[in-house]
Amino acid sequence: MRIGVLGGTGPAGSALASRLGSVGVEVVVGSRLQERADETVRGILGRWPGRHLALTAGTNQVAAGCPVVVVATPWEGALPTVKALSGELAGKTVVSMVNAMARWGERFVPLLPPTGSVAAALATALPASRVVGAFHHLPAGPLGDLDQELSADVMVFSDHRAATEEVVGLVERVPGLRGVDVGGLGSALAVEALTAALVEVNRRYKAHASVKVTGIG
Ligand SMILES: NC(=O)c1ccc[n+]([C@@H]2O[C@H](COP(=O)([O-])OP(=O)(O)OC[C@H]3O[C@@H](n4cnc5c(N)ncnc54)[C@H](OP(=O)(O)O)[C@@H]3O)[C@@H](O)[C@H]2O)c1
């Protein structure tokens, strides 16, 4: 499997790229600037010298050429980014890990996009792509620390059944992660908004909390 990460130079995208690269997924770390992608890949490879990580660097346009493309930009950049690449993204599975949040004093609070969720906005902008939501609740620190074992569920949602299954399969290539199908894009608002609560948990407990769904075997 080959995946591209738009905004792969940030903590979230580079952590996901590292983790997926460590389990043999080929990842193109994308950026608006080739040099930033180069620097990010050099940084990851330098951090993990003994490991074979299947990472390459490219522009977001190159990353968008992969069959599965993850959007890992801040929420305000997600829509313009995918709109500019809608041609490249047509026919692809586009995975949003984007959360819309704002700082309110010391706290983080979820924002309600006019479309109801970031993923719904992306799906509207990309009618020829299969938009899936996943990875919203995995903090970048442990995700990118390949010495840390993970133990978390990843809520996956999409209106495209086959794309949900494809992304659950991608999630479960990573030891310790389980993909949980939480339904269609109607679940996006709840999943995205929950992240702000997790950030508050992390702030209060000085932790890197994620989620586990119980009772489903
Ligand atoms: N951080 C986490 O622990 C975490 C965990 C799960 C999900 N998420 C979600 O993942 C997304 C990325 O998080 P992050 O912390 O990595 O964010 P970030 O560092 O603020 O941004 C990630 C990358 O996006 C690109 N970017 C920045 N502003 C942009 C804009 N206006 N338009 C297009 N591209 C832009 C930049 O890459 P270039 O300059 O190289 O293009 C940047 O390195 C967010 O939506 C966040 O909610 C984060």
Image (cartoon, grey):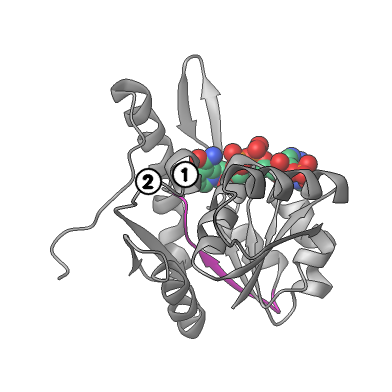
Segment colored magenta: 127-136
Q: Is the distance from the Cβ of mark 2 to the nearest ligand 1 atom less than 8 Å?
A: no
Residue 179 in the image, given as x and y percentages of width and height: 36, 67
Residue 134 in the image, given as x and y percentages of width and height: 47, 60
The kind of secondary structure element at disc 2 is loop
Return the residue nearer the eye: 18 or 112: 18
In which quadrant is the N terminus drawn?
bottom right
Quarter holding residue 177: bottom left
Is most of the magenta stretch helix, strand or loop?
A: loop
Residue 26 in the image, given as x and y percentages of width and height: 63, 70
The residue carrying pointer 2 sits among few (fewer than 14), some (14 to 19) or many (20 or more) residues within 10 Å by Cα, namely few
Q: Is residue 75 above or below residue 115?
A: above
Q: Which residue is mark 1?
A: 145
Amino acid type, callout 2: Gln
The residue carrying pointer 1 sits among few (fewer than 14), some (14 to 19) or many (20 or more) residues within 10 Å by Cα, namely some
The kind of secondary structure element at disc 1 is loop
Q: Tell me if I can see residue 174 in this picture.
A: yes
At horizontal 74% and vertical 73% (from top left) the residue drawn is 89
Q: Which residue is mark 2?
A: 148
